[in-house]
Image: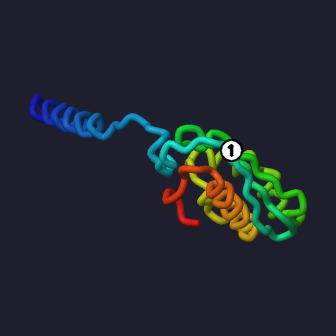
Amino acid sequence: MYRKISGFFIIVLTLSLILSACIVEYDPTLNMHPAYGTASGTATGSAQGFGGTVTVTLTLKDGYIENAVVSGPKESTGYGANAVASAGGMEGIIVGTNSVELDTLSGASTTTRAITAAGKAALSKIPGTEGYYTP
């Protein structure tokens, strides 16, 4: 009986040590695009969306995107308009990942590509961002 209990405690202790070694502190910058050098400034870029022009205004400070504003008032009703209307989501993704490289939204692929292109156009207007993204 003593051997069964001590064997059980050894297994529990071993698993506890293994699990405690696996715990890592969450770092929100792990999914972040590297900084755009030390670039700072604000610029607006535009690109053709499905229903019209999509604009993105970016504000960079010390190489990080601090603010993004997405606008596309003539995007088609439904998916395209929803992609821009939920721009808080797109804007949050741009700021949170420090990148304008967005995954395409199903049903709004043209609008999503336009947001990415407009973001890149905005980046190209901010001095010091050259070489930190693919035009």
Nearest the eye: 35 or 10 = 35
Q: Residue at x 35, y 37 (%)?
A: 24
Q: Is residue 101 above or below residue 2?
A: below
What amino acid is found at the position of numbered circle 1 in the picture?
Thr
Nearest the eye: 69 or 10 = 69
Q: Is residue 70 left or right of residue 116?
A: right
Residue 117: where, in percent of width, then height? 68, 64
Occupied quadrant, residue 64: top right
Q: Residue at x 77, y 57 (%)?
A: 83
Q: Read off the residue under disc 1.
A: 42
Q: Residues within 10 Å of mark 1 (few under 14, many from 20)?
A: some
Q: Is residue 65 left or right of residue 52?
A: left
Residue 94: where, in percent of width, then height? 63, 50
Q: Secondary structure at mark 1?
A: strand
Q: Quadrant of the N terminus?
A: top left
Q: Is residue 86 above or below residue 111?
A: above
Residue 118: where, in percent of width, then height? 71, 60
Occupied quadrant, residue 82: bottom right
